[in-house]
Image (cartoon, rainbow, N blue to C red):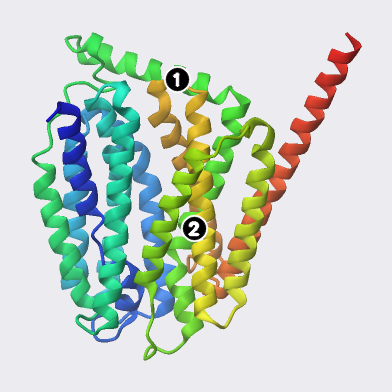
Protein backbone atom coordinates (compact mmCIF):
# COMPACT_ATOMS: atom_id res chain seq x y z
CA UNK A 1 0.00 0.00 0.00
CA UNK A 2 1.32 3.46 -0.91
CA UNK A 3 2.31 5.67 2.01
CA UNK A 4 -0.20 8.46 1.26
CA UNK A 5 -3.06 5.96 1.01
CA UNK A 6 -2.07 4.39 4.34
CA UNK A 7 -2.00 7.80 6.06
CA UNK A 8 -5.28 8.85 4.47
CA UNK A 9 -6.93 5.61 5.56
CA UNK A 10 -5.63 5.96 9.12
CA UNK A 11 -6.95 9.52 9.44
CA UNK A 12 -10.26 8.61 7.78
CA UNK A 13 -10.82 5.85 10.33
CA UNK A 14 -10.24 8.36 13.12
CA UNK A 15 -12.66 10.77 11.43
CA UNK A 16 -15.31 8.05 11.21
CA UNK A 17 -14.84 7.04 14.85
CA UNK A 18 -15.02 10.59 16.23
CA UNK A 19 -18.32 11.14 14.42
CA UNK A 20 -20.00 8.13 16.04
CA UNK A 21 -21.94 10.25 18.50
CA UNK A 22 -25.51 8.87 18.51
CA UNK A 23 -26.28 10.78 21.69
CA UNK A 24 -25.99 14.18 19.96
CA UNK A 25 -29.32 14.19 18.05
CA UNK A 26 -31.09 13.62 21.38
CA UNK A 27 -28.78 15.46 23.81
CA UNK A 28 -31.35 18.20 24.52
CA UNK A 29 -34.02 15.65 25.45
CA UNK A 30 -31.46 13.90 27.66
CA UNK A 31 -30.53 17.12 29.49
CA UNK A 32 -34.10 18.19 30.23
CA UNK A 33 -35.31 14.71 31.20
CA UNK A 34 -35.97 14.69 34.98
CA UNK A 35 -34.75 11.08 35.26
CA UNK A 36 -31.11 12.09 34.73
CA UNK A 37 -30.93 15.86 35.15
CA UNK A 38 -32.77 18.50 37.07
CA UNK A 39 -32.37 21.14 34.37
CA UNK A 40 -35.12 23.26 32.86
CA UNK A 41 -35.41 24.01 29.16
CA UNK A 42 -34.45 27.63 29.85
CA UNK A 43 -31.32 26.62 31.76
CA UNK A 44 -30.12 24.41 28.92
CA UNK A 45 -30.70 26.95 26.13
CA UNK A 46 -29.77 30.12 28.02
CA UNK A 47 -27.06 29.01 30.46
CA UNK A 48 -25.55 25.76 29.13
CA UNK A 49 -25.34 25.96 25.33
CA UNK A 50 -23.87 29.52 25.26
CA UNK A 51 -20.83 28.31 27.25
CA UNK A 52 -19.89 26.06 24.32
CA UNK A 53 -20.11 28.99 21.91
CA UNK A 54 -17.96 31.27 24.06
CA UNK A 55 -15.32 28.62 24.78
CA UNK A 56 -15.12 27.61 21.10
CA UNK A 57 -14.45 31.22 20.13
CA UNK A 58 -11.86 31.74 22.88
CA UNK A 59 -9.95 28.57 22.08
CA UNK A 60 -10.01 28.49 18.28
CA UNK A 61 -7.12 30.86 17.56
CA UNK A 62 -4.98 29.49 20.39
CA UNK A 63 -5.48 25.91 19.27
CA UNK A 64 -4.89 26.84 15.63
CA UNK A 65 -1.45 28.22 16.52
CA UNK A 66 -0.66 25.39 18.91
CA UNK A 67 -1.69 22.86 16.26
CA UNK A 68 0.98 24.06 13.86
CA UNK A 69 3.54 24.52 16.64
CA UNK A 70 2.91 21.03 18.08
CA UNK A 71 2.69 19.47 14.62
CA UNK A 72 -0.92 18.31 14.61
CA UNK A 73 -0.89 14.89 16.25
CA UNK A 74 -0.98 16.05 19.93
CA UNK A 75 -4.05 18.14 19.15
CA UNK A 76 -5.76 15.21 17.44
CA UNK A 77 -5.14 13.21 20.61
CA UNK A 78 -6.55 16.16 22.61
CA UNK A 79 -9.63 16.04 20.37
CA UNK A 80 -10.30 12.43 21.29
CA UNK A 81 -9.43 12.94 24.97
CA UNK A 82 -11.79 15.92 25.28
CA UNK A 83 -14.54 13.70 23.84
CA UNK A 84 -13.88 11.17 26.61
CA UNK A 85 -14.15 13.93 29.22
CA UNK A 86 -17.36 15.30 27.69
CA UNK A 87 -19.28 12.06 27.67
CA UNK A 88 -17.96 10.82 31.01
CA UNK A 89 -19.23 14.07 32.56
CA UNK A 90 -22.58 13.70 30.78
CA UNK A 91 -22.93 10.18 32.16
CA UNK A 92 -21.81 10.71 35.73
CA UNK A 93 -22.62 14.28 36.71
CA UNK A 94 -25.91 16.07 37.39
CA UNK A 95 -25.57 19.75 38.36
CA UNK A 96 -25.90 22.80 36.14
CA UNK A 97 -22.31 23.85 36.77
CA UNK A 98 -21.01 20.42 35.78
CA UNK A 99 -22.95 20.52 32.53
CA UNK A 100 -21.47 23.96 31.85
CA UNK A 101 -18.03 22.36 32.27
CA UNK A 102 -19.15 19.83 29.66
CA UNK A 103 -19.82 22.70 27.27
CA UNK A 104 -16.36 24.14 27.89
CA UNK A 105 -14.78 20.84 26.88
CA UNK A 106 -17.15 20.72 23.89
CA UNK A 107 -15.57 24.02 22.84
CA UNK A 108 -12.15 22.33 23.14
CA UNK A 109 -13.46 19.39 21.08
CA UNK A 110 -14.74 21.66 18.27
CA UNK A 111 -11.65 23.89 18.23
CA UNK A 112 -9.28 20.90 18.15
CA UNK A 113 -10.93 19.66 14.95
CA UNK A 114 -8.71 22.13 13.08
CA UNK A 115 -5.86 19.67 13.70
CA UNK A 116 -7.81 16.88 12.02
CA UNK A 117 -8.57 18.96 8.94
CA UNK A 118 -4.99 20.25 8.52
CA UNK A 119 -2.96 17.17 9.54
CA UNK A 120 -3.35 15.41 6.21
CA UNK A 121 -1.90 18.35 4.24
CA UNK A 122 1.31 18.17 6.25
CA UNK A 123 1.72 14.42 5.70
CA UNK A 124 1.08 13.93 1.97
CA UNK A 125 2.30 15.62 -1.21
CA UNK A 126 0.20 18.30 -2.91
CA UNK A 127 -0.58 16.05 -5.85
CA UNK A 128 -2.74 13.89 -3.54
CA UNK A 129 -4.62 16.73 -1.78
CA UNK A 130 -7.85 16.22 -3.74
CA UNK A 131 -7.94 12.48 -3.04
CA UNK A 132 -7.17 12.71 0.66
CA UNK A 133 -9.64 15.57 1.13
CA UNK A 134 -12.30 13.39 -0.48
CA UNK A 135 -11.40 10.44 1.75
CA UNK A 136 -11.49 12.38 5.02
CA UNK A 137 -14.70 14.23 4.11
CA UNK A 138 -16.39 10.97 3.11
CA UNK A 139 -15.32 9.37 6.40
CA UNK A 140 -16.84 12.22 8.41
CA UNK A 141 -20.12 12.13 6.50
CA UNK A 142 -20.28 8.34 6.77
CA UNK A 143 -19.73 8.55 10.52
CA UNK A 144 -22.44 11.18 10.94
CA UNK A 145 -24.95 9.31 8.81
CA UNK A 146 -24.24 6.03 10.61
CA UNK A 147 -24.54 7.78 13.96
CA UNK A 148 -27.89 9.39 13.12
CA UNK A 149 -29.38 6.16 11.75
CA UNK A 150 -28.13 4.14 14.71
CA UNK A 151 -29.53 6.64 17.21
CA UNK A 152 -32.93 6.73 15.52
CA UNK A 153 -33.25 2.96 15.32
CA UNK A 154 -32.27 2.46 18.96
CA UNK A 155 -34.72 5.10 20.17
CA UNK A 156 -37.59 4.24 17.82
CA UNK A 157 -37.49 0.55 18.74
CA UNK A 158 -37.02 1.36 22.45
CA UNK A 159 -33.75 -0.59 22.55
CA UNK A 160 -32.07 2.16 24.57
CA UNK A 161 -32.99 5.39 26.30
CA UNK A 162 -31.38 8.80 25.83
CA UNK A 163 -28.81 8.18 28.57
CA UNK A 164 -27.70 4.85 27.13
CA UNK A 165 -26.79 6.54 23.85
CA UNK A 166 -24.06 8.36 25.77
CA UNK A 167 -22.39 5.03 26.59
CA UNK A 168 -22.05 4.29 22.86
CA UNK A 169 -20.59 7.75 22.22
CA UNK A 170 -18.27 7.41 25.22
CA UNK A 171 -16.98 4.08 23.90
CA UNK A 172 -16.45 5.53 20.41
CA UNK A 173 -14.44 8.42 21.90
CA UNK A 174 -12.18 5.97 23.75
CA UNK A 175 -11.59 3.93 20.59
CA UNK A 176 -10.96 7.13 18.57
CA UNK A 177 -8.43 8.36 21.14
CA UNK A 178 -6.57 5.05 21.16
CA UNK A 179 -6.54 5.09 17.35
CA UNK A 180 -5.17 8.67 17.34
CA UNK A 181 -2.10 7.43 19.22
CA UNK A 182 -1.29 5.21 16.22
CA UNK A 183 -1.27 8.07 13.69
CA UNK A 184 2.17 8.87 12.22
CA UNK A 185 3.92 11.90 13.71
CA UNK A 186 4.43 15.02 11.58
CA UNK A 187 8.01 16.23 11.07
CA UNK A 188 7.19 19.57 9.39
CA UNK A 189 4.38 22.12 9.31
CA UNK A 190 3.54 25.21 7.30
CA UNK A 191 4.47 27.98 9.73
CA UNK A 192 6.53 26.85 12.72
CA UNK A 193 8.33 23.82 11.28
CA UNK A 194 8.89 24.40 7.55
CA UNK A 195 11.24 22.10 5.70
CA UNK A 196 13.92 24.76 5.15
CA UNK A 197 14.03 25.90 8.80
CA UNK A 198 13.92 22.61 10.67
CA UNK A 199 17.38 23.09 12.20
CA UNK A 200 17.03 26.81 12.98
CA UNK A 201 16.66 28.24 16.54
CA UNK A 202 13.12 28.51 17.92
CA UNK A 203 13.28 32.35 17.95
CA UNK A 204 13.95 32.45 14.21
CA UNK A 205 11.22 29.88 13.61
CA UNK A 206 8.68 31.99 15.52
CA UNK A 207 9.73 35.17 13.73
CA UNK A 208 9.46 33.57 10.29
CA UNK A 209 6.16 31.90 11.19
CA UNK A 210 4.44 35.18 12.07
CA UNK A 211 5.95 36.97 9.07
CA UNK A 212 4.58 34.24 6.79
CA UNK A 213 1.16 34.40 8.45
CA UNK A 214 0.99 38.17 7.99
CA UNK A 215 2.08 37.80 4.36
CA UNK A 216 -0.56 35.14 3.68
CA UNK A 217 -3.23 37.19 5.45
CA UNK A 218 -2.42 40.40 3.56
CA UNK A 219 -2.17 38.71 0.17
CA UNK A 220 -5.41 36.75 0.63
CA UNK A 221 -7.73 39.41 2.04
CA UNK A 222 -6.49 42.25 -0.16
CA UNK A 223 -8.20 40.35 -2.97
CA UNK A 224 -11.78 41.70 -3.00
CA UNK A 225 -13.08 38.51 -4.63
CA UNK A 226 -11.68 36.39 -1.79
CA UNK A 227 -12.99 38.94 0.73
CA UNK A 228 -16.50 38.73 -0.72
CA UNK A 229 -16.71 34.94 -0.57
CA UNK A 230 -15.07 34.93 2.87
CA UNK A 231 -17.77 37.29 4.14
CA UNK A 232 -20.49 34.92 3.01
CA UNK A 233 -18.57 31.98 4.52
CA UNK A 234 -18.39 33.74 7.90
CA UNK A 235 -21.99 34.97 7.98
CA UNK A 236 -23.55 31.77 6.65
CA UNK A 237 -21.44 29.50 8.85
CA UNK A 238 -22.46 31.60 11.84
CA UNK A 239 -26.12 31.13 10.92
CA UNK A 240 -25.74 27.41 10.24
CA UNK A 241 -24.00 26.66 13.55
CA UNK A 242 -26.54 28.71 15.48
CA UNK A 243 -29.51 27.04 13.78
CA UNK A 244 -28.00 23.57 14.24
CA UNK A 245 -27.18 24.19 17.91
CA UNK A 246 -30.68 25.29 18.91
CA UNK A 247 -32.75 23.17 16.52
CA UNK A 248 -33.60 20.51 19.11
CA UNK A 249 -35.13 23.04 21.55
CA UNK A 250 -37.32 24.34 18.69
CA UNK A 251 -38.51 20.83 17.80
CA UNK A 252 -39.27 20.16 21.47
CA UNK A 253 -41.29 23.37 21.62
CA UNK A 254 -43.22 22.40 18.48
CA UNK A 255 -44.01 18.86 19.63
CA UNK A 256 -44.69 19.96 23.24
CA UNK A 257 -45.38 16.36 24.26
CA UNK A 258 -42.57 14.14 25.53
CA UNK A 259 -44.63 11.01 24.95
CA UNK A 260 -44.67 11.48 21.17
CA UNK A 261 -41.92 9.87 19.04
CA UNK A 262 -39.24 12.17 17.63
CA UNK A 263 -36.99 11.61 14.64
CA UNK A 264 -34.00 13.85 15.29
CA UNK A 265 -31.50 11.11 14.42
CA UNK A 266 -33.18 10.31 11.11
CA UNK A 267 -33.31 13.99 10.17
CA UNK A 268 -29.61 14.46 10.89
CA UNK A 269 -28.81 11.37 8.80
CA UNK A 270 -30.89 12.67 5.87
CA UNK A 271 -29.19 16.08 6.13
CA UNK A 272 -25.77 14.42 6.13
CA UNK A 273 -26.54 12.44 2.96
CA UNK A 274 -28.07 15.51 1.31
CA UNK A 275 -25.01 17.53 2.32
CA UNK A 276 -22.77 14.95 0.69
CA UNK A 277 -24.84 15.06 -2.53
CA UNK A 278 -24.86 18.86 -2.46
CA UNK A 279 -21.09 18.95 -2.11
CA UNK A 280 -20.78 16.45 -4.96
CA UNK A 281 -23.07 18.48 -7.23
CA UNK A 282 -21.18 21.65 -6.38
CA UNK A 283 -18.00 19.98 -7.55
CA UNK A 284 -19.57 18.87 -10.83
CA UNK A 285 -21.38 22.07 -11.87
CA UNK A 286 -19.43 24.15 -14.34
CA UNK A 287 -20.39 27.83 -14.13
CA UNK A 288 -18.83 31.26 -14.02
CA UNK A 289 -19.14 32.10 -10.32
CA UNK A 290 -17.58 35.51 -10.94
CA UNK A 291 -20.66 36.43 -12.97
CA UNK A 292 -23.32 34.50 -11.03
CA UNK A 293 -21.85 34.37 -7.52
CA UNK A 294 -23.72 37.26 -5.90
CA UNK A 295 -27.07 36.18 -7.38
CA UNK A 296 -26.63 32.57 -6.23
CA UNK A 297 -25.52 33.56 -2.73
CA UNK A 298 -28.48 35.95 -2.47
CA UNK A 299 -31.04 33.37 -3.61
CA UNK A 300 -29.67 30.69 -1.28
CA UNK A 301 -29.75 33.10 1.66
CA UNK A 302 -33.36 34.07 0.88
CA UNK A 303 -34.46 30.42 0.66
CA UNK A 304 -32.64 29.64 3.91
CA UNK A 305 -34.28 32.63 5.57
CA UNK A 306 -37.81 31.56 4.63
CA UNK A 307 -37.12 27.95 5.64
CA UNK A 308 -36.04 29.07 9.12
CA UNK A 309 -38.85 31.63 9.52
CA UNK A 310 -41.41 29.00 8.52
CA UNK A 311 -39.89 26.57 11.02
CA UNK A 312 -40.30 29.17 13.74
CA UNK A 313 -44.05 29.49 13.05
CA UNK A 314 -45.22 26.01 12.06
CA UNK A 315 -47.11 23.71 14.43
CA UNK A 316 -46.11 20.56 12.54
CA UNK A 317 -42.70 19.18 13.45
CA UNK A 318 -42.36 17.19 10.19
CA UNK A 319 -42.55 20.44 8.22
CA UNK A 320 -39.86 21.84 10.47
CA UNK A 321 -37.76 18.75 9.76
CA UNK A 322 -38.13 19.35 6.02
CA UNK A 323 -37.23 23.03 6.37
CA UNK A 324 -34.13 22.15 8.40
CA UNK A 325 -32.97 19.65 5.76
CA UNK A 326 -33.52 22.22 2.98
CA UNK A 327 -31.67 24.85 4.99
CA UNK A 328 -28.72 22.54 5.68
CA UNK A 329 -28.61 21.19 2.13
CA UNK A 330 -28.34 24.71 0.70
CA UNK A 331 -25.60 25.52 3.17
CA UNK A 332 -23.51 22.44 2.32
CA UNK A 333 -23.90 23.12 -1.39
CA UNK A 334 -22.84 26.76 -1.23
CA UNK A 335 -20.10 26.28 1.38
CA UNK A 336 -18.45 23.80 -0.99
CA UNK A 337 -18.57 26.35 -3.78
CA UNK A 338 -17.29 29.04 -1.41
CA UNK A 339 -14.30 27.01 -0.24
CA UNK A 340 -13.46 26.15 -3.83
CA UNK A 341 -13.64 29.77 -5.01
CA UNK A 342 -11.53 31.00 -2.10
CA UNK A 343 -8.94 28.29 -2.70
CA UNK A 344 -8.57 29.30 -6.37
CA UNK A 345 -7.37 32.81 -5.56
CA UNK A 346 -5.07 32.33 -2.58
CA UNK A 347 -1.67 30.74 -2.15
CA UNK A 348 -1.81 26.98 -1.58
CA UNK A 349 -0.16 27.08 1.84
CA UNK A 350 -2.52 29.78 3.15
CA UNK A 351 -5.74 27.76 2.74
CA UNK A 352 -5.85 26.61 6.36
CA UNK A 353 -5.09 30.09 7.69
CA UNK A 354 -7.78 31.77 5.57
CA UNK A 355 -10.49 29.26 6.46
CA UNK A 356 -9.39 29.41 10.10
CA UNK A 357 -9.82 33.19 10.10
CA UNK A 358 -13.18 32.89 8.34
CA UNK A 359 -14.34 30.40 10.96
CA UNK A 360 -13.11 32.68 13.74
CA UNK A 361 -15.09 35.61 12.28
CA UNK A 362 -18.14 33.31 12.03
CA UNK A 363 -17.77 32.50 15.72
CA UNK A 364 -17.53 36.20 16.58
CA UNK A 365 -20.87 36.76 14.83
CA UNK A 366 -22.30 33.68 16.52
CA UNK A 367 -21.15 34.89 19.92
CA UNK A 368 -22.85 38.23 19.32
CA UNK A 369 -26.11 36.49 18.34
CA UNK A 370 -25.86 34.20 21.36
CA UNK A 371 -25.18 37.05 23.78
CA UNK A 372 -28.00 39.26 22.47
CA UNK A 373 -30.75 36.74 21.82
CA UNK A 374 -29.99 33.62 23.89
CA UNK A 375 -27.94 34.14 27.05
CA UNK A 376 -29.90 34.73 30.24
CA UNK A 377 -28.88 37.83 32.18
CA UNK A 378 -27.02 39.32 29.20
CA UNK A 379 -29.48 39.65 26.33
CA UNK A 380 -33.15 39.05 25.60
CA UNK A 381 -33.07 35.27 26.33
CA UNK A 382 -35.70 34.60 23.66
CA UNK A 383 -37.82 31.47 23.45
CA UNK A 384 -36.91 28.98 20.68
CA UNK A 385 -39.60 30.15 18.25
CA UNK A 386 -38.59 33.80 18.64
CA UNK A 387 -34.92 32.88 18.29
CA UNK A 388 -35.57 31.20 14.97
CA UNK A 389 -37.52 34.14 13.67
CA UNK A 390 -34.42 36.24 14.42
CA UNK A 391 -32.16 33.71 12.67
CA UNK A 392 -34.42 33.85 9.63
CA UNK A 393 -34.15 37.64 9.60
CA UNK A 394 -30.37 37.28 9.95
CA UNK A 395 -30.28 35.30 6.69
CA UNK A 396 -32.48 37.90 5.02
CA UNK A 397 -29.88 40.47 6.09
CA UNK A 398 -27.19 38.32 4.43
CA UNK A 399 -29.27 38.36 1.24
CA UNK A 400 -29.59 42.16 1.39
CA UNK A 401 -25.81 42.53 1.85
CA UNK A 402 -25.12 40.44 -1.23
CA UNK A 403 -27.77 42.24 -3.27
CA UNK A 404 -25.84 45.44 -2.50
CA UNK A 405 -22.52 43.79 -3.34
CA UNK A 406 -24.01 42.46 -6.59
CA UNK A 407 -25.24 45.94 -7.56
CA UNK A 408 -21.83 47.46 -6.82
CA UNK A 409 -20.08 44.79 -8.91
CA UNK A 410 -22.59 45.22 -11.75
CA UNK A 411 -22.18 49.02 -11.79
CA UNK A 412 -18.40 48.64 -11.80
CA UNK A 413 -18.60 46.24 -14.75
CA UNK A 414 -20.87 48.63 -16.63
CA UNK A 415 -18.50 51.51 -15.95
CA UNK A 416 -15.49 49.48 -17.15
CA UNK A 417 -17.44 48.36 -20.23
CA UNK A 418 -18.36 51.94 -21.18
CA UNK A 419 -14.74 53.03 -20.78
CA UNK A 420 -13.60 50.21 -23.06
CA UNK A 421 -16.23 51.18 -25.67
CA UNK A 422 -15.11 54.83 -25.60
CA UNK A 423 -11.48 53.83 -25.99
Image vertical order of residue 194 relative to residue 75, above or below: above
Q: Give residue 122's position: percent from left, percent from top.
A: 25, 26
Q: Give residue 114's position: percent from left, percent from top.
A: 32, 40
Q: Residues within 10 Å of mark 2 (few under 14, many from 20)?
A: many
Give me the residue at 37% from left, 19% from top.
Answer: 210
Circle 1 — which element?
loop
Give me the residue at 49% from left, 81% from top.
Answer: 253
Image vertical order of residue 73 relative to residue 194, above or below: below
Q: How many marks?
A: 2
Image vertical order of residue 160 relative to residue 309, above or below: below
Quarter of the figure with the C terminus: top right
Q: Residues within 10 Å of mark 1 (few under 14, many from 20)?
A: few
Q: Give residue 100's position: percent from left, percent from top.
A: 31, 64
Q: Which of marks 2 and 1 precedes in the sequence?
A: 2
Residue 196: name its quadrant.
Answer: top left
Q: CA distance from mark 1 to mark 2?
A: 29 Å
Circle 2 — which element?
helix
189 to the left or right of 275 = left
Give the residue at mark 1: 347
| Residue 364 seen | no
Give the residue at mark 2: 328
Which of the two residues, 306 or 372, is positioned nearer the viewer here? 306
Give me the residue at 33% from left, 73% from top.
Answer: 26
Amino acid sequence: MKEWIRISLALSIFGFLKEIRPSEPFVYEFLIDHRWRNLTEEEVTQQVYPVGTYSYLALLVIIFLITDLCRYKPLIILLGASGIVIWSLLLWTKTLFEVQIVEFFYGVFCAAEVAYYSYIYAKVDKEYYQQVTSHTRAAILAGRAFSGILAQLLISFSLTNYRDLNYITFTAMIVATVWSLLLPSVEKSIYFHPEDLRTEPIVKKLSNAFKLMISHFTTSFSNTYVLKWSLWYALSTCGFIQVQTYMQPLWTAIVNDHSKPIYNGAVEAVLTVLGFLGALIAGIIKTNWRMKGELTLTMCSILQAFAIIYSSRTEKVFLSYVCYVIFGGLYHFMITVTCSEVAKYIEDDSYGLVLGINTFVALIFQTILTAIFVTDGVGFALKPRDQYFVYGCFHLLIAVIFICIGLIVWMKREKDYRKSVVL
